[in-house]
């Protein structure tokens, strides 16, 4: 049976986006017309993943509400003759199943994944970070390609990687590939936040993973690392160290990762998605061109 379930961790505090995230989940922030996590689910659906298991935490109920079917709203739109707006709620009725569990203490991404273990039994699964969109408007089938590699290579795990400018390697988990990193490659190791001089490549982990159940076993044995958190990367490294096959798949050029974890990349993501909007993109472009033509002093810089 092919993999059809994804764990979507959405329980983090999102402290880098305070005060925006004080009472709303960062995964619900708007990027263009949709909240981040809706793009994540749509991308997964495109890759054939129909069962989504969210690992939520305090203050995250807006996510559950978003994926519930709101029959009252649907009825209201019908009686008011606003049929065209019903299309905007199509995603509610996708042939999708949503499940929820809680991470009772925010002990890191690896711990969030481990919280799903009792519900998954012994099957392989996808992990898709709830604060990252792959590709403009989530036009990506990276997860499908990763599953093909995972199954074809008999891998213990497969990780998505994105090329980043060398000066940025110290912000990410970085691949140490075996041999030349072509589109698909085997990993020799993973290095967490290396200095530019020590980085074995400029391929950064890009928010999507395919894991065998062995990853749960490793996570359960992984002691807390940086910041007292249980890191998914540490569990994956332990698999590699034991000679298990862990594969990397590179994102294609059109599959940029939009990380909604800090203000710099959130602003860039919003601007790009808004500029691509079929109705308002051209107006925003004109507005931005007008603003950029002004001396920077007039922009409060
Ligand atoms: P981040 O690594 O960005 O952590 O999470 P964070 O805690 O949300 O944000 P900061 O560092 O405080 O700003 C990446 C993804 O993993 C989830 C987050 O919700 C996000 O979707 N996550 C992170 C959890 O589910 N649990 C955790 O303990 C940490």
Image (cartoon, rainbow, N blue to C red):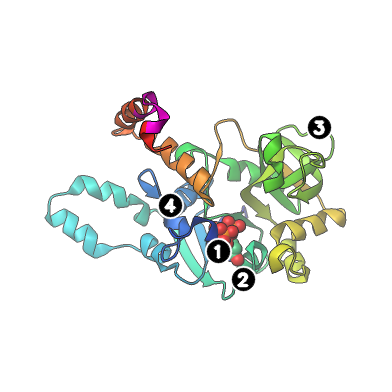
Stretch of the chain drawn in magenta: 291-297
Sequence-first tag of 1 and 2? 1
- Mark 2 element type: loop
Mark-to-mark CA distance, 3 and 2: 36 Å
Magenta stretch: helix, strand or loop mostly: helix
Image location (x, y in percent) of residue 11: 53, 65
Q: Are marks 2 and 4 in contact (CB under 8 Å)?
A: no
Q: Is residue 202 above or below residue 104?
A: above
Q: Which residue is mark 2?
A: 115
Q: Label 3 CB, ligand 1: below 8 Å?
A: no
Where disc 4 sits, the SS reads: helix
Quarter holding the N terminus?
A: bottom right
- Judging depth in this view, the residue of 155 and 250 nearest the camera is 250
Q: Give neighbour class at mark 1: few <14, some 14-19, many 20+ (Cα, 10 Å).
A: many
Displayed quadrant of residue 176: top right
- The residue lying at 62 percent from left, 52 percent from top is 2
Residue ID at (59%, 30%): 253
Left or right relative to 241: residue 233: left
Residue 6 in view, yes or no: no
Q: Quadrant of the C terminus?
A: top left
- CB atoms of marks 1 and 2 within 8 Å: no
* 241 part of magenta stretch: no
**Mark 1 CB lies closer than 8 A to ligand 1:** yes
Q: Residues within 10 Å of mark 2 (few under 14, many from 20)?
A: many
Q: Is residue 299 visible?
A: yes
Q: Marks 2/4: CA distance?
A: 22 Å
Residue 180's label in the rendered image is 3
Decide: few, some or many residues near mark 4? Use Cα within 10 Å; few <14, some 14-19, many ≥20.
Answer: many
**Residue at label 1?**
12
In the image, residue 141 lies at what x, y percent?
Answer: 55, 40
């Amino acid at each position: 049976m092919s993999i059809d379930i994804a764990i979507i961790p959405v329980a983090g505090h999102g402290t880098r986006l305070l005060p925006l995230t004080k009472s709303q989940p960062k995964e619900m922030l708007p990027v263009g017309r949709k909240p981040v996590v809706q793009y994540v689910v749509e991308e997964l659906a495109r890759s054939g993943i129909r069962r989504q298991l969210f690992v939520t935490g305090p203050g995250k109920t807006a996510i559950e509400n978003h994926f519930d079917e709101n029959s009252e709203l649907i009825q209201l739109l019908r009686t008011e003759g606003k049929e065209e707006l019903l299309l905007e709620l199509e995603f509610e009725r996708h042939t999708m199943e949503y499940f929820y569990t809680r991470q009772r203490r925010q002990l890191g991404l690896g711990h969030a994944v481990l919280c799903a273990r009792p519900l998954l039994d012994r099957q392989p699964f996808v992990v898709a970070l709830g604060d990252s969109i792959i590709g403009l408007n989530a036009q990506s089938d990276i997860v499908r390609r990763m599953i093909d590699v995972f199954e074809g290579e008999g891998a213990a795990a497969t990780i998505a990687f994105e090329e980043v400018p060398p000066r940025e390697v110290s912000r990410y988990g970085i691949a140490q590939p075996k041999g030349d990193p072509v589109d698909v490659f085997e990993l020799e190791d993973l290095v967490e936040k290396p200095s530019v001089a020590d980085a074995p490549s400029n391929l950064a982990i890009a928010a999507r993973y395919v894991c065998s159940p062995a990853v749960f076993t490793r996570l359960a044995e992984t002691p807390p690392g940086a910041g007292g958190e249980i890191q998914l990367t540490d569990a994956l490294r332990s698999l590699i160290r034991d000679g298990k096959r862990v594969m990397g798949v590179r994102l294609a050029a059109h599959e940029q990762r939009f990380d909604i974890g800090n203000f710099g990349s959130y602003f860039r993501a919003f601007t790009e998605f808004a500029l691509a909007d079929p109705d308002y993109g051209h107006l925003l472009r004109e507005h931005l061109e007008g603003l950029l033509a002004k001396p920077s002093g007039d922009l409060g810089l």
